[in-house]
Image (spheres, rainbow, N blue to C red):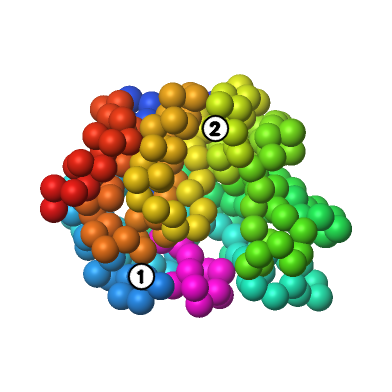
Amino acid sequence: MSATPKVRLNRLFNHGKCLDVAIDHGIANEPDFLIGLEDIGSVMNSLIAAQPDAIQVNYGQADLLQQYSAKKPALVMRTDVGNAYNAARHREMWAVLHNPEQPILAALQMDAAAVVVNLYMIPDEPAIFRQCVENIGRLRHACEQYGMPLMIEPLVMAPAGQGAAYGSLGDVSKIVPLVRLARELGADIIKADPTDNIEDFHRVVEAARCPTLVRGGGKGELATVLDKTAALMAQGASGMVYGRNVYQHSNPSQVVKALMAIIHQGASGSEALAIYQQY
C-alpha cells in the first residue's frame, strides 16, 4: 500500500480501531430502512456531536458532514447501488457503481477517507456476483491511482423467501472464502457479517489480513448488541459498522458513546450499557 492510502486510513482508524456509523440506507429504496432517518440532517448533527470515528453516507448526503469546519468524523462514501435489500425478489438482480467511468471522483471531491462497495453472493444469482467483481475491479484501479482506501463488504445472502429481502447469513464456512476473495481482489478494509458462533469470527479476521469491521445489520436489543460487540472485538475485529443499531434507537449519540467505550477502551457490554443509561 502506498503512503497516501495510509494517510487516509489514519483518519479513519484511531490506534487501529474504528466505529463507522452508516446512514447510507436511503440508497436501498426500502422504506423500513428509513425509519429514524426521516430528518437525516438532524441525525447527522447528533452523530457529529457524538464523534464516532467515521460516518458512512452516499454522495448526495455527504455535504451534511463536510459542511462542518470543526472537528468531525471521517467520511466513508458508498460507491454502489443495487436491489438486493428489497422485500420482494426482483426478476433481475443488479449492483452498479454510481459513476462507472470515474468511480471515486465524488469521494475525492468530498474528501472521503475511504470508499465502500458490496460483494454479494446470492444463491442462483451469478450475474449480480459478476457485476460486483467488475465493480471492485474498476474501483481498485481508481483507488490505486488516487490513493483511496477500498472497503469491500462481502455478503453471503440467504435464498429468496427467507425473511425480508435477501437477509445475510452468518455461516462461517461461506463467509471466510468470500472474505478471502475480497482480499484477493484488493480490499484495504473488510466489512463482514458476524459469524453465527462469535468464537469463529477470528477466522474471518485471519482470512482478511487487513482491518476487519463487523457489519451490524438490523436493529437488535441494545444490551445484546453491546455484549456481541465486546465479544467480536475480543475475536480480533478492528471495529464496527452500525447503522440501524444506532440511528433507530431513542438516543443515537449515547449509543455511539457506549460503542466507542467498547471499541477504544475495552469496556464490557454491561459497562457500555451503563454508559448508555446515563443520559
- Image position, residue 80 (x, y; %): 60, 60
Task: Name above or below for residue 6 compared with residue 19.
Answer: above
User: Which amino acid type is shown beneath numbered disc 1?
Assistant: Gly
Residue 198: image tag: 2
Which residue does the image show at 28% across and 36% down from the upper left? 270
Left or right position of 178 against 193: right
Residue 8 visible, this angle: no
Which residue does the image show at 61% across and 39% down from the upper left? 196
Screen quadrant of the N terminus: top right
Task: Name above or below for residue 4 compared with residue 62.
Answer: above
Tell which tag, 2 or 1, sits nearer the viewer: 2
Left or right position of 181 against 79: right
- Image position, residue 251 (x, y; %): 24, 59
Which residue does the image show at 81% across and 75% down from the upper left? 91
- The answer to the question of whether label 2 and label 1 lie on touching residues, with beta carbons closer than 8 A, is no
Residue 36: image tag: 1
SS under mark 2: helix
Task: Verify whether residue 188 appears in magenta.
Answer: no
Task: Name above or below for residue 255 compared with residue 96.
Answer: above
Task: Name above or below for residue 247 compared with residue 228.
Answer: below
Residue furthest left in the image: 279
Residue 26: image tag: none
Q: Nearer the viewer, residue 253 or 73?
A: 253
Q: Which residues are magenta?
A: 23-34
How many numbered circles are shown? 2
SS under mark 1: loop
